[in-house]
Image (cartoon, grey):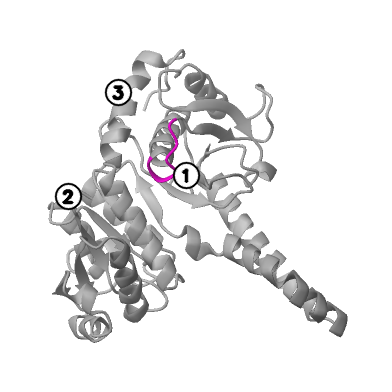
Amino acid sequence: MSKQPRIAIDAMGGDEGVRVMMAGVALARRRHEGLRFTLFGDESRIKVALDNHPNLRAASEVVHTDQVVEATDKPSVALRKSKNSSMGLAIQAVKAGDAGAAVSAGNTGALMSMAKVALRTMPGIDRPALAALLPTLGSNDVVMLDLGANTECDARNLVQFAVMGGAYARTVLDLARPRVRLLNIGTEDLKGTDEIRDAAATLRGAIALPMDFEGFIEGDKLASGDADVIVCDGFAGNVALKTAEGTARFVTDLLRRAFTSSIRSKIGFLISKPAMHLLRHHLDPNNHNGAVFLGLNGVVVKSHGGADEKGVANAVHVAARLLEEDITRRIAEDLANIGALAPVEMPAK
C-alpha cells in the first residue's frame, strides 16, 4: 500500500465484546502492517485487551467514551447518541477526515441511520445500499445488494445499485467486467415488476460501463456462480440473505445429526471428514464477513454481531481494500456515464 489509511473502530459493537473486536483488528493489522487505527469505546477495557496485542497497541489511538449504542436501540434513539457513542464517534471521524473508514459490529439500523445523516449520499446516488459477499459454487463469491437498507426501490435505485455493485465487484473480486443480474421471479423479459423491467432496459443500454448486464436471475440460482453481482430491493435481498443463512445452518445441523445417529454413521463421518471440513469452511459466515454501505461519502463497513476474531479481521480487510482501491471514485466515474448510455428515461427521483 502506497498510502496507509487510518480506520476508525467501534470497539464496543458486537456480541462477543471488546476482546474479540481487538483480537480481530490485531489479526487484520498483521495482514496490513501499515494500517493505523482509532479505537472508540471504554478506554480501560480497550487497554486491557490491547495488552495481548502489542502490534495493535503501537498502531492505535484510543478515544474514551462510555456511551454505547445497544442492539435494541431504535435508529431514532441511536441518532440522539451519535455525538458521544462509540459508533457515532467512529462515523464522525470519517466525516471529519480523521479516518478513511469506519468499522462496527453494532446495531445495523443505527449504523445505517448515523452514516446517512453524517456522511450523506454521493452525488448521483439517491439511496445507499448494503452490499455483501456470498459464497457460490463458481470460481468466486457473488456481490449482492441491497440487503436491507431500502425496502422499496424504483428503477433508478436499482440501476444505481447495479453501478455500485459492479464497482465493488471490480474492487474486491478483481474482475474487469463483472456479470450483473437483477433478482426476479423469472428470467423472461416480461417477468417482474415495472421497476425491475425498467431497470433492466436501462442496464441493457449501458454497454460502455465496465460490467456485463446478463438479465434476470431467480432465487434458486443465487449460489450457482452464474452472476458476479445480484441486484434487488432491500426487502427481497434481506429475505434472500436470511433464507440462505438459515438453509446453511439447516444443512450443517442435518449432517451433524445424520453422522451421529449410529456407529455406522460415525465411521462414515470419519471417512468424509476432509470433505466436511471443506463444507464447513465454505459456509462459515466469518469468511465472508464485512457488509458495506455503498453510495455514501465515506466507507462504512458492518461486521456481523456474532463474528469471531477471524470475521472481524475480514471486515477490517474489506475496509482497507476499499480505501486502497478508492471505491468512491470508481462509483462516481461509472455514475457519470449512465445518463449518456441509458436507452430509456430514468424515473424521476
Residue 340 point in image, percent of width and height: 35, 14
- Image point (62%, 37%), residue name: 226
Q: Which mark's residue is nearer the viewer, 1 or 3? A: 3
Which residue type carries mark 3?
Ala
Q: Could you classify mark 3 by the number of other residues whose Cα lies within 10 Å: few (under 14), some (14-19), or many (20 or more)? A: few
**Residue 110 visible within the image:** no
Q: Give the mark, 1 or 3, whose residue is nearer the N terminus.
A: 1
* Magenta segment: 171-176
Chief secondary structure of the magenta portion: loop
Place residue 30 in its image quadrant.
Answer: bottom left
- Residue 3 is marked as 2
Q: Give how far apart the Cα atoms at labels 1 and 2 are.
A: 30 Å
Which residue type carries mark 2?
Lys
- Image point (38%, 51%), residue name: 292
Instruction: Check whether the beta carbons of the residues at disc 1 and disc 2 lie within 8 A of each other.
Output: no
Residue marked by disc 3: 336
Q: Is residue 270 above or below residue 338?
A: below
Answer with left or right where residue 22 lies relative to residue 162.
left
**Dot 2: element:** loop
**Residue 243 visible within the image:** yes
Residue 265 point in image, percent of width and height: 83, 78
